[in-house]
Image (cartoon, rainbow, N blue to C red):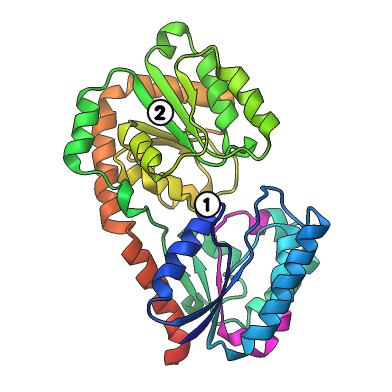
Amino acid sequence: MNVLFIAPLPPPLAGHSLAAKVFYDHLSTKHNVTVVNFNKTSFKEGFSSFNRIFEVLGILWKIAKVYKTADVIYITISESFAGNIKDLLTYAICSKKIDRFYVHLHGGSIKRLLWDKYPLLHRINKYFLKQIAGVIISGESHKEVFDQFVVPNKIHTIPNFALDYLFAESEQIINKFSTIGPIRVLYMSNMIDKKGYDQLASAYIKLPKALQQQIIIDFAGRFELDIQKERFENKIKDYPGLTYHGVVDDTQKQQLFFQSHVFALPTSYFEGQPISILEAYAAGCAVITTGQSGILDIFKDGVNGIQMGDGLSDAINSTLIKMIDQKNRLSSIGLKNAVLAKQLYRIPIYARSLTSVLELSVAQ
């Protein structure tokens, strides 16, 4: 099977590019894969510079040259206005093989932030997507994005995964909770305001000193601008319980997850299905997070951790206090999350499921 693979690949490493790489690595062992990499180094959405415009034109030119030999075309779609225009141009360029497209949605915001705002854009997307071979989503909550114009048997739900080296053994999890003093909380994601890192720090700072002494919070992730990094480091420098580790490698990442009791993602994004939460499950952490629809596909309040009302500092503050009050429950939650991750969120399950979906086109 000849596959045209249109997706972002690392670097930089983020949830979207990691998922694409994991799938590509598996798919390329079984099939002939041609990659068109549309990754970018900036967090900014859209065509933020002339260089990016030329990059996108180069991507479209490459697609036009190689699509004709593809048996299947796999694309992870964008959720920004400019990104969606790029996707629509891709559909148009490959229109003779539109019925060979598999569209993979990783995020959770395209309907509310894009299609609902721009009816004409939605109609154009609908025109193309009605003709494709199938849609891949990570959770049931995202069916509403497509269910008005894609028949149910073309919508495939495949959850995300955690990397193998982040799965902790039961004994490791028991040990880290048996020696629990201060509760170790980990935030590991891109250092973007909407992800809630700054609000988490503010929530900690608002706590009385007696409660601050019962929590340690580690932050890890990439800032886009040095000035943002400097501002955050200045904000937390007087608080020994707050540490920013920068961009971490795999060894540091494993160490941070394995020593943490709780993972925090106080995001206000319309999330898809955060891989970071599944990594926390694998490492035996309880989770505190917001109730975004994509998160609720994999997270239940009181079962996997504590759900907060929103990602604002007051709500996070209340959640941290509740976490302290429920300290004795964290161990059992972490152990259950680890079992769940081993059952449902392994790379082989993810990669084989995606490959099987693409192979449907060739079999039919």
Chain part drawn in magenta: 92-112
- On screen, residue 18 versus residue 348, left or right, reads right
Identify the residue shown where x is 32% and y is 40%. 303
Q: Is residue 47 above or below residue 211?
A: below
Q: What secondary structure is marked by label 1?
A: loop
Which residue sits furthest left? 171
Q: Which residue is mark 1?
A: 13
x and y percent of residue 60 in the render?
72, 75
- Which of the marked residues, 2 or 1, is nearer the chain's N terminus? 1
Q: Which residue is mark 2?
A: 185
Identify the residue shown where x is 57% and y is 21%. 202
- On screen, residue 280 versus residue 293, left or right, reads left
Q: Is residue 194 visible?
A: yes
Circle 2 Cα neighbour tier, 10 Å, few/some/many (<14 / 14–19 / ≥20): many
Which residue sits furthest right? 50
Circle 1 Cα neighbour tier, 10 Å, few/some/many (<14 / 14–19 / ≥20): some
Question: Which image quarter: residue 100?
Answer: bottom right
Q: Give the amino acid type for the residue marked by disc 2 in the picture.
A: Val
x and y percent of residue 300 in the render?
38, 43
Q: Is residue 302 visible?
A: no
Q: Quadrant of the C terminus?
A: bottom left
Residue 128 falls inside the magenta stretch = no
Q: Nearer the viewer, mark 2 or mark 1?
A: 1
